[in-house]
Image: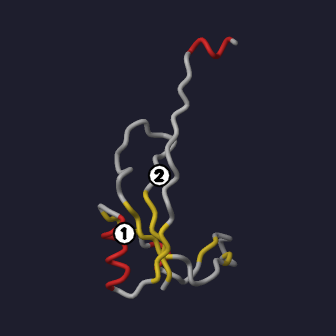
Amino acid sequence: MAARIYQRPKSAMQSGKARVDEWVLEFEQSEARRPDPLMGWTGSGDTQAQVQLTFPSKDAAKAYAEKYGITARVHATPPKSLKLQAYADNFR
C-alpha cells in the first residue's frame, strides 16, 4: 500500500484557521478508475482510496505508516506568503 502525508490546506471558502494544523494520511489509488457502463459515473473497486486519516502532527502520521508497513511520501507544506495591499492600490 502506498500513501501520501500532507498538511491540510486552507479552503478558499474559509477565512479562519480551523483544521489547518491537521496532517492527513491518504491512500493512493491502486486501481484505475473506469466509467460505469449503465450510469456513466467513474469509480473503481479500490476502497482504500476513500480513506483519510487525520493526525495532530507529521511525526504521528509517519509513525502510524511505519507501524502498519505503509510506504508513505511526505509532501512539504508550501510557505505562506501574505500579499499586503492597501485599498488605495486599487486606484493606481
In the rendered image, residue 57, in percent from the top left (x then y), is placed at 32, 62
Cβ–Cβ under 8 Å for marks 2 and 1: no
In the rendered image, residue 47, in percent from the top left (x then y), is placed at 47, 80
Label 1 sits on a secondary structure element that is: strand
**Whether residue 18 is situated above or below residue 76 in the rendered picture:** above
Residue in the foreground of this view, choosing between 21 and 54: 21
The residue beneath circle 1 is: 53
Quarter of the rendering occupied by the C terminus: top right
In the rendered image, residue 61, in percent from the top left (x then y), is placed at 35, 71
Mark 1 surroundings: few (<14), some (14-19) or many (≥20) residues within 10 A: few
Query: Which residue is drawn at the image coordinates 56% and 15% (left, top)?
Result: 87
| Amino acid at the residue labelled 2 | Pro
| Amino acid at the residue labelled 1 | Leu
Farthest bottom residue in view: 69
The residue beneath circle 2 is: 9
In the rendered image, residue 17, in percent from the top left (x then y), is placed at 37, 42
